Amino acid sequence: MTAITAELVKTLREKSGAGMMDCKRALTETDGDIEAAIDWLRAKGISKADKKSGRTAAEGLIGIVSAGTKAVAIELNSETDFVARNEAFQELVRGIANVAIGTDGTVEAISKANYPATGKSVDESVKDAIATIGENMTLRRSALLHVEHGVVATYIHNAAGDGIGKLGVLVALKSVGDKEVLNSIGRQVAMHIAATNPLAIRADEVDAGVAERERNVFIEQSRASGKPDNIIEKMVEGRMRKFFEEVALLSQAFVMNPEITVGQAVKDAEKLAGAAIEVTGMARLLLGEGVEKEETDFAAEVAAVAKK
């Protein structure tokens, strides 16, 4: 049996926001499994850990470059926002994005590619920038989408300049329809994705493991009602339908017009485009997503120094 240490309890508290004793009990019930403990807390209505799982900590910028039927997004991290506002850093982000669109879009391929401004690889150029600017930098993530016919629309939220910002979205639309219409609806869908962060394009594409976890949480919550198993089954199925509607892009209420779904908005755009439109891909890069940074209590830090 896994020992429930203070460090394990602390980790669960940070992830879930639940109290110490609740965290200890959850870990005891799940034999120290953090993810299972989070689900246990959620099932008991104690935690909303899923709302906190995407805390943003790292600084830097997202860079996007579009070439009609192809677009790429990259994330270059820095230690501070001060460096992210540096013109040299911003040009580096734009430059790497321009290089990235000529690769297969993976971080490995981008890092090895030639960076025209220096004649070295992207990886070596980033290391040179670290030495010049004096702060660590990391090419952490990238995404590339391509369609044979149609457009890959883009959107940048919290833009810091041309093609750079804190949040970047790509949406691939397969169609032989009017490009202007495709770009218009594509940008709207990209803005929607920026706001809602869907897990998949369609309900049947939601990760099976994620869906199973939700189902198990709903089952535990429904059992607490004391209702018969046949009623519980119907309750769970209803909640799962609602879950898929909320996390699958095409079934979500469209932020531009909540009276219709995203799928309906795309269908309506087909009339103007003069051809069928299929959403074949999406990518959403939020700066620093999934990277936690230790919070600093500056008041406590100053007080501690003063006592020395």
Image (cartoon, rainbow, N blue to C red):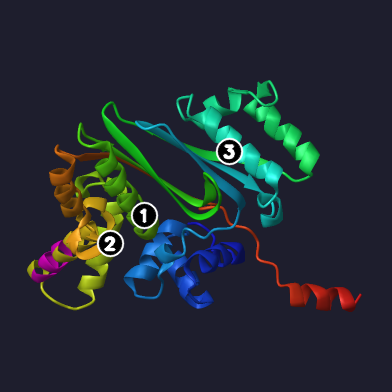
- Which segment is the magenta one? 231-237
* Distance CA(mark 3)–CA(mark 1): 21 Å
Question: Along the polypeptide, which appears first: circle 2 or circle 3?
Answer: 3
For mark 3, give the secondary structure: helix
Q: Residue at x 41, y 31 (%)?
A: 67
Q: Position of residue 51 (x, y in %)?
A: 42, 65
- In the picture shown, does residue 121 fall above or below 298? above
Gap between marks 2 and 1, in whole Å? 9 Å
Which residue is label 3 attached to?
94
Of the pair 147 and 21, the residue shown nearer to us: 147
Question: Which label's residue is closer to the chain start, 3 or 1?
Answer: 3
> Which mark is on residue 124?
none
- Residue assigned mark 1: 191
Q: Residue drawn at (38%, 60%), measured in percent from left and top?
A: 195
227 falls in the magenta region: no
Classed neighbour count for the residue bearing mark 3: other residues with Cα under 10 Å, few (<14), some (14–19), many (≥20)? many
Tell me which amino acid carries mark 1: Met
Query: To which residue does mark 2 refer?
Result: 256
Q: Residue at x 41, y 35 (%)?
A: 71
Of residues 253 and 21, the one nearer the viewer is: 253
Coordinates of residue 275 in the picture (x, y in percent): 14, 37
Mark 2 element type: loop
Tell whether position 236 is magenta.
Answer: yes
Question: As shown in the figure, which amino acid type bears the numbered disc 3?
Answer: Arg
Query: Can residue 33 be seen at all in this image of the molecule?
Result: no
Is residue 41 visible to the viewer in this orientation of the structure?
Answer: yes
Q: Is residue 98 above or below residue 164?
A: above
Residues at circles 2 and 1 in contact by the CB criterion of under 8 Å: yes
Of 64 and 5, which appears nearest the observer? 64
**In which quadrant of the rendered image does the C terminus lie?**
bottom right
